[in-house]
Image (cartoon, grey):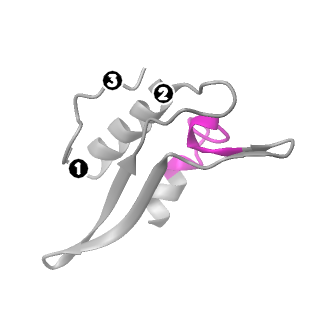
């Protein structure tokens, strides 16, 4: 999980509103949920990403796709469902 947070907090993604925000009394929860799951003898990161309607301006969903693609490549991940859903 530490490795994931280092990616999300990198300059490429830091403070991007698509991952949730608090701004002037407004809060938007992140549409990206993750948890560690044990499968077989190993542990894996499970991501669930939801394309939701934001209360304020719509964020750049392309940035979400970029993060998911980077994580998939970095940890040799697989799409369980919705791999062809466009985020833009």
Tell me the magenta residue range. 7-21
Question: Could you tell me residue 57's position as x and y percent?
Answer: 67, 24
Please give the residue where the numbered disc 3 appears in the rendered image.
86
Q: Earlier in the sequence, mark 2 or mark 3?
A: 2
Quadrant of the snapshot with the C terminus? top left
Please give the residue where the numbered disc 2 appears in the rendered image.
61
Q: Secondary structure at mark 3?
A: loop
Q: Earlier in the sequence, mark 1 or mark 3?
A: 1
Question: Could you tell me residue 32's position as x and y percent?
Answer: 47, 49
Q: Residue furthest bottom?
A: 41
As drawn, the label of residue 77 is 1
Q: Residue at x 35, y 46 (%)?
A: 71
Q: Is residue 15 magenta?
A: yes
Q: Residue at x 33, y 23 (%)?
A: 86
Magenta stretch: helix, strand or loop mostly: loop
Q: Quadrant of residue 87?
A: top left
Q: Secondary structure at mark 1?
A: loop
């Amino acid at each position: 999980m530490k490795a994931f947070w280092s990616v999300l907090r990198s300059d490429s993604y830091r403070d991007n509103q698509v991952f949730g925000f608090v701004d002037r009394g407004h809060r938007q929860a992140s549409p990206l949920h993750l948890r560690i799951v044990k499968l077989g003898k190993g542990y894996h990161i499970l991501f669930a990403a939801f394309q939701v309607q934001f209360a304020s301006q719509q964020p750049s969903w392309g940035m979400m796709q970029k993060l998911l693609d980077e994580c998939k490549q970095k940890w040799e991940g697989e799409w369980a469902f919705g791999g062809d859903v466009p985020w833009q």
